[in-house]
Each structure stands twice: as structure tokens, then as C-alpha cells.
Image: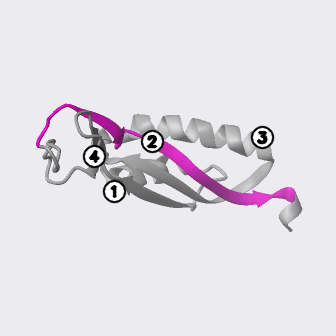
Amino acid sequence: MHEFSIMQGIFSLIEDTVAKNNLIKIDRVVLKIGKLRQIFPDFLQFAFETISQNTIASGAELIIEEVPITMRCKSCQEKFKVEHNTYICPSCNATELELLTGKEILIVSIEGETKDDD
């Protein structure tokens, strides 16, 4: 289950953000995960809940937004979303494609409270 190692890396970035912004509580974390990463959202949620126990992120909401696989055809420059694992340009049937989205793991936002938020 590679979701735990991925979440450990994400949590390290969350901790950096906490330190830089003097947060005392994390309320919500929003991630964008590319479909090609083959990450199971339920496993990632479980990893987040486990890793965040007894931290300022304990009980925080994790929102995972899936990023579709999009390609650009190198022949006709058509941009398209990959459906049903079909990696063929729908316009010209070429198979030489450039990946545009689908492999990313992005922290979109971290919402929390600072000492000043009383």
C-alpha cells in the first residue's frame, strides 16, 4: 500500500506549512491526485487519518480531487481526455502523444487556525 509513503511525504510538506504559518490547528487539506498515480482515495484517507493522529491535523478533513489523464497528439495537436485507457488521438488516430495531466500530486490548500484566529 504505497498510499502511506505518499501521505508521509505530503504530511512532511504540511508540517513545513504549519511551521511557516504559525498554525495551531489544521481544519482541511485539499489534494489533487492524477489518475495515473493509481492511488486509492480510501487508502489515502486512511493513511491521512493514521498519520495525523495526535497532531494538529487530527480530525482534519481531507479532500481528494482526481485529475483526469489528458494528452496532446503530436501529429495534429488535438488535446483530449483519455477514456477507458484508450491512448489514441480521437481526431487522427495517431498514437504519439504527450502527457499533459494525470501524474500530479498537488497540495491545493491547507486550511487551519493561527494563534490570532481566536
User: Disc 1 to disc 3, how far (Cα)?
Assistant: 29 Å
Query: In this rendering, would 47 be left or right of 20?
Result: left
**Which quadrant would the N terminus be assigned to in this image?**
top left
Which mark's residue is nearer the viewer, 4 or 1?
A: 4
Mark 1 or 2 closer to N-term? Answer: 1
The boundaries of the magenta stretch are: 93-115
Q: Which mark is residue 42?
A: 1
Residue 75: image quadrant is: top left
Q: Are marks 1 and 3 in contact (CB under 8 Å)?
A: no
Q: Residue at x 78, y 46 (%)?
A: 21
Q: Main secondary structure of the magenta part?
A: strand
Residue 118 included in the magenta stretch of the image: no
Which three-letter amino acid code belongs to the residue tagged 4?
Answer: Glu
Q: Secondary structure at mark 1?
A: helix
Of callouts 4 and 3, which one flags the residue occurring earlier in the amino acid sequence? Answer: 3
Q: Could you tell me the amino acid type at mark 1?
A: Asp
On the image, numbered disc 3 is attached to which residue? Answer: 20
Residues under labels 3 and 2: Cα distance? Answer: 21 Å
Residue beneath disc 4? 78
The three-letter amino acid code for the residue at tag 2 is Ile
User: What is the x, y in percent for residue 112?
Assistant: 70, 59
The residue tagged 2 is: 105
Q: Is residue 113 magenta?
A: yes
